[in-house]
């Protein structure tokens, strides 16, 4: 959900009017995708740009998909005879402007995926040069959004064009007004009214607080869990008492992934728990793993490994990513990693507690068995002695 980014939208728009490359960097989960789609794109359309937002960077065919999306958008908005050609981006920008009289704005979302999936390949050598050169074109505009950790890799474009970071915007956390607007707007969208104390509780949750502001992804994670409960329990107004049923606002947020996990059966849950040691590094970084490796690590549960993977992808827990022409699976979002890690630890604690109970039961059963055995031996000895005395 998009909210309160007027300053950033205005800044990106001013950069676009000035010409030259525009790069937006952010920490994962700051809402760069929403900023592009719901903020920047509408403003550019009002300024008579033809806008194309693209973020599907995986596989060798991404360049073809981009060209086809550009042609489809131009046909829908300005020239119904426009078709895709085999040409570079600069030529496309020039041809769109010549055909329609309107500049084309390409909003490249999740560009870190491109940099990661196409590193040191002949395809990346070509497309790196295309993007870098097109950024300097006066016939259109290119806005690139990527996570801040990928900025160093983005600098590889400098060999094709000077200063690709000429106009660089860092997207930070929400301020208090933006966070409250997000909560209120999400409540209205879900048919819920949040009491002021609920809003304050959400804003005080440690996971939401980030670098002097509020993390939109974790805030929405908690809100989505409340909305799900609201639909299920037919709430219209949310009070702090309802939040406290989850333990606290922090637990409400951190355990929001339980909504996804609850859709797995016990066997699937145990298998995903086992996979977490492969999908997460000790430093809480996500790792892309081949399906064969996950299946091999599944042990006796490998029979359900290949059926569980699409379920986890559909639920937004995992995603597929193609690196070096090899399909792999990883945690769906960087910002989801702490939630998965917390779930993993909680599930591990449950398993340990279960094992302790089972051990105690086995120990007690063994002790009782030994006592009964001793009693039986004593009883049999007594009976034998009694018989001997009777003789």
Image: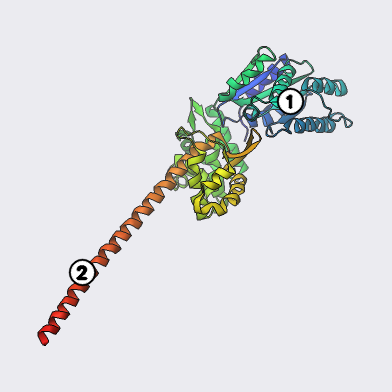
277 versus 370 height, above or below: above
Which residue is located at x 72 percent, y 14 percent? 18
Q: Secondary structure at mark 1?
A: strand
User: Looking at this rendering, what residue extends furthest in the top direction?
Assistant: 162
Label 1, label 2: how many angstroms apart (C-alpha)?
Answer: 83 Å
State left or right for residue 48 relative to residue 8.
right
Query: Going from the N terminus, do you reach mark 1 or mark 2 first?
Result: 1
User: Looking at this rendering, what residue extends furthest in the right direction?
Assistant: 81
State left or right for residue 326 relative to residue 138.
left
Q: Nearer the viewer, residue 214 or 58?
A: 58
Q: Are marks 1 and 2 in contact (CB under 8 Å)?
A: no
Q: Secondary structure at mark 2?
A: helix
User: Looking at this rendering, what residue extends furthest in the left direction?
Assistant: 389
Which residue is located at x 58 percent, y 24 percent? 150
Q: Is residue 77 visible?
A: yes
* Residue 244: quadrant of the picture: top left
According to the image, label 1 marks what residue? 106
According to the image, label 2 marks what residue? 374
């Amino acid at each position: 959900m998009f909210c309160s980014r007027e300053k950033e939208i205005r800044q990106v728009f001013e950069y676009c009017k000035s010409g030259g490359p525009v790069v937006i960097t952010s920490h994962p989960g700051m809402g760069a995708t929403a900023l592009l789609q719901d903020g920047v794109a509408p403003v550019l359309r009002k300024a008579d740009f033809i806008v194309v937002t693209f973020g599907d960077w995986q596989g060798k065919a991404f360049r073809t998909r981009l060209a086809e999306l550009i042609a489809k958008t131009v046909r829908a908005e300005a020239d119904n005879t426009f078709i895709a050609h085999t040409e570079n981006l600069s030529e496309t920008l020039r041809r769109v402007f010549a055909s329609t009289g309107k500049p084309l704005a390409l909003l490249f979302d999740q560009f870190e995926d491109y940099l990661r999936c196409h590193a040191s390949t002949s395809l990346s050598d070509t497309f790196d040069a295309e993007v870098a050169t097109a950024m300097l074109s006066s016939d259109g505009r290119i806005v690139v959004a990527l996570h801040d950790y990928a900025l160093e890799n983005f600098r590889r474009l400098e060999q094709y064009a000077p200063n690709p970071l000429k106009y660089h915007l860092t997207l930070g956390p929400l301020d208090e007004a933006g966070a409250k607007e997000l909560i209120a707007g999400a409540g209205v969208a879900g048919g819920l009214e949040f009491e002021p104390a609920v809003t304050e509780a959400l804003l005080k949750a440690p996971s939401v607080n980030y670098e002097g502001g509020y993390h939109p992804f974790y805030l929405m994670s908690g809100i989505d869990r409340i909305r799900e409960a609201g639909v299920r329990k037919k709430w219209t107004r949310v009070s702090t008492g309802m939040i406290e049923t989850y333990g606290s606002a922090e637990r409400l947020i951190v355990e929001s992934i339980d909504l996804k996990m609850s859709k797995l059966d016990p066997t699937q849950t145990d298998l995903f728990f086992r996979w977490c040691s492969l999908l997460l590094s000790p430093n809480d970084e996500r790792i892309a793993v081949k399906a064969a490796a996950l299946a091999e690590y599944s042990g006796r549960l490998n029979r359900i490994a290949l059926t569980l993977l699409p379920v986890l992808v559909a639920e937004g827990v995992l995603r597929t990513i193609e690196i070096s022409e090899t399909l792999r699976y990883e945690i769906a979002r960087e910002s989801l990693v702490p939630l998965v890690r917390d779930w993993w630890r909680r599930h591990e604690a449950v398993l340990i507690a279960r094992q302790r109970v089972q051990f105690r039961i086995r120990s007690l059963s063994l002790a009782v068995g030994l006592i009964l055995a001793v009693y039986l031996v004593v009883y049999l000895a007594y009976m034998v002695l009694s018989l001997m005395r009777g003789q």
